[in-house]
Amino acid sequence: MGMAAPRFAPVSPVSESRAYSSPDHVPDGWVPQRPGEVNGLQPRESRLGAQGPDQGFALRIARLLEPEIQVTPGEHRADAIRGCLGIALRRASIFSRAPVVHDLRLALVIWGYFDPSPEADLVEVRSGLFEGVAHTAHHYAEGRHIADLVPESTLRLTPELASARYKGDWRTLTGVGSASH
């Protein structure tokens, strides 16, 4: 087998012209058959999250939005971010894409983290739900619960529409209903 040569390289006029030829054997198509490979669709069970591409990018987005996050005394920005990341990733997965700033912005809006003076009822609910979720190793289930609370109808809203509805309808948007959690 010879090496490829540039077009301007001299070629003997009596040598055969070189052209592509198919190999004698064409292998069969690849199918997933090793242990651990997903056959068909991604599984959907509790605690599996919402699969999607480039989910780590949501952490970069969170760092950019962190200065805008408003927390009350006793709350922590890290808990707000971690609790809202699952919502953002769920939203991105609904649209079959990687997370974008609008996903995290919507999650933070519905929980009142951009509001400098949120309703006391909202703060009470979110404080109980979000407390400690930044410690994922110990509070993964709680973070998943927050993500799973939010109705899909909320996730399909634009951040602007969610903002417009937030003040009077945060219970419906977050999925906590009218009873305290």
Image: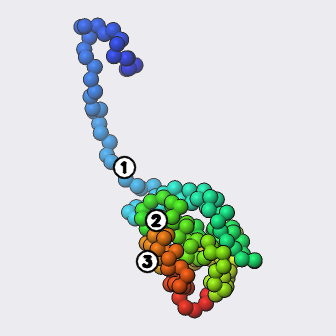
User: Where residue 27 sits: x, y (%)?
Assistant: 32, 42
- In terms of image quadrants, where is residue 112? bottom right
User: Where residue 73 sits: x, y (%)?
Assistant: 75, 77
Q: Please name the residue that numbered disc 2 is placed on.
A: 93
Residue under the image location 61 percent in, 90 percent down: 180
- In terms of image quadrants, where is residue 12? top left
Q: Please name the residue that numbered disc 3 is placed on.
A: 153
Structural distance between the alpha carbons of marks 1 and 2: 26 Å
For the residue pair 39 and 19, the one nearer the viewer reads as 19
Residue extending farthest to the bottom is 179
Asked whether the beta carbons under mark 2 and mark 3 sit within 8 Å of each other, the answer is no
User: Where residue 166 sits: x, y (%)?
Assistant: 53, 79
Q: Secondary structure at mark 3?
A: helix
Structural distance between the alpha carbons of marks 2 and 3: 14 Å
Asked whether the beta carbons under mark 1 and mark 2 sit within 8 Å of each other, the answer is no
- What amino acid type is highlighted by mark number 3? Ser
In the rendering, which numbered label is found on residue 121?
A: none
Sequence order check: which comes first, mark 2 or mark 3? 2
For the residue pair 5 and 21, the one nearer the viewer reads as 5
Q: Nearer the viewer, mark 1 or mark 2?
A: 2
User: Crowdedness of circle 3 by 10 Å Cα count: few (<14), some, many (20+)?
Assistant: few
- What amino acid type is highlighted by mark number 1? Trp
Sequence order check: which comes first, mark 1 or mark 2? 1
Question: Could you tell whether 131 is left or right of 169 in the image?
Answer: right
Q: Please name the residue that numbered disc 1 is placed on.
A: 30
User: Crowdedness of circle 1 by 10 Å Cα count: few (<14), some, many (20+)?
Assistant: few
